[in-house]
Amino acid sequence: MHDQEKNWILMTGVTRGIGRSLAEILRQRGISVCGLVRPAKVQQVSGWLDAVVPWELELPWAENSAETLFSTLSGKRVIGFVHAAGVLGPMDDVPDAGNVQAWVRWWSASAAAHRVNHASGMEILTAVLPKLSAWKNTTGKRSSFVAHLSSGAALKPYVGWNAYCASKAAILMDFKCLAAKIAAGQTTVLSVAPGTVMTDMMKQVLASDPSAFPALPKFKSLEQSGGLVAPEVPAGQIITWMLDSSQQQIEAWHGEFYDVRTNNSLTK
Ligand SMILES: NC(=O)c1ccc[n+]([C@@H]2O[C@H](COP(=O)([O-])OP(=O)(O)OC[C@H]3O[C@@H](n4cnc5c(N)ncnc54)[C@H](OP(=O)(O)O)[C@@H]3O)[C@@H](O)[C@H]2O)c1
């Protein structure tokens, strides 16, 4: 099949966790996946992904190769962009400003989390938005879509997750602003919460210091009760919702926040 005949999805976060499961399921469904991955991870994914673009999300646009991104997408029918990458950012308390080294380290880790979770995702999204194409599923014509993996932390404050909550809230609002600007029939703007998922990010949460992260017992108890699901579970639910909904069904989620656990909105 020629590239023009295939449907492609551009994604971040394909190396591990939920993003990797999403990419694997998309490929099983016959959708080609182009992953934006750190240069050091290109070799790791190039054996199974359809296309790879080296991209370090912590770095600003000018320090990545937009030329490679655009030339890789050229001639392909790209129906969507999914920003699945994310980091927790610093979870220890902000150090005293007098401790200059620790202070600078903390704020630079916080800035990196804001870039990965919010700014870089929006930057890539905005650049590729005009290049996205409509497509067809079994229900009929669908507009292109952009999506990001959101979190309850975008809405609820957690002590120790300042950078994570703030950056997740920022991208959620950026998505809502975009949805207010463009029609769903042009590009559907989707925010989706995967629930509590056993990934490397969750392992980092479970290994955190309870004095810095007082919500730790909640996650430990979810771990014991089986409430931390494998990444392929929400990934399968997200793909079914994202790909198999009709245009009318998916438009109901334009600028909204879909929770896969309840099939409901978290912000309506
Ligand atoms: N796990 C949960 O319970 C949960 C709940 C709600 C929302 N989420 C959201 O779901 C998304 C995926 O989370 P996860 O749990 O699957 O995380 P994960 O297993 O830790 O995977 C994170 C992904 O982000 C990529 N990434 C991080 N920093 C990057 C950078 N600087 N440049 C390029 N790629 C980078 C990683 O690539 P590398 O391999 O190169 O590091 C990896 O592919 C995140 O947005 C997270 O906020 C997760």
Image: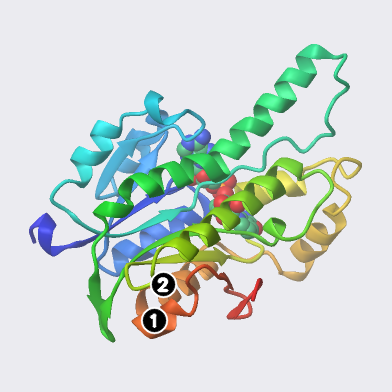
**Residue at the spot of label 1:** 245
**Residue at the spot of label 2:** 242
| Quadrant (top left, top right, bottom left, bottom right) of the N terminus | bottom left
Residue 105 left/right relative to 170: right
Q: Which mark is drawn over residue 103?
A: none
Q: Where is residue 113 in the image (x, y as percent from the top left)?
A: 62, 37
Please identify the residue farthest to the right as the structure is shown: 211
Q: Residue at x 44, y 64 (%)?
A: 189
- Note whether residue 199 is visible: no
Q: Which colour scheme is used?
A: rainbow
Q: Residue at x 71, y 41 (%)?
A: 163
Circle 1/circle 2 CB separation < 8 Å = yes
Q: What residue type is disc 2 on?
A: Met
Residue 244 left/right relative to 260: left
Q: Distance between the residues labelled 1 and 2?
A: 6 Å
Residue 219 left/right relative to 76: right
Q: What residue type is disc 1 on?
A: Ser
Specify the quadrant of the image occupied by residue 186. bottom left
Tag 2, which secondary structure?
A: helix
Q: Position of residue 32 (x, y in %)?
A: 25, 58
Crowd class of label 2 (few under 14; some 14 to 19; many from 20; radius 10 Å)? some
Residue 176 left/right relative to 124: right
Tag 1, which secondary structure?
A: loop
Q: Which of 178 and 200 is in front in this view?
A: 178
Q: Position of residue 3 (x, y in %)?
A: 12, 55
| Quadrant (top left, top right, bottom left, bottom right) of the C terminus | bottom right
Q: Which residue is drawn at 91% across and 41% down?
A: 211
- Note whether residue 171 is visible: yes
Residue 252 drawn above or below residue 23: below
Q: Position of residue 213 (x, y in %)?
A: 84, 46
Q: Which residue is drawn at 75% across and 62% down?
A: 223
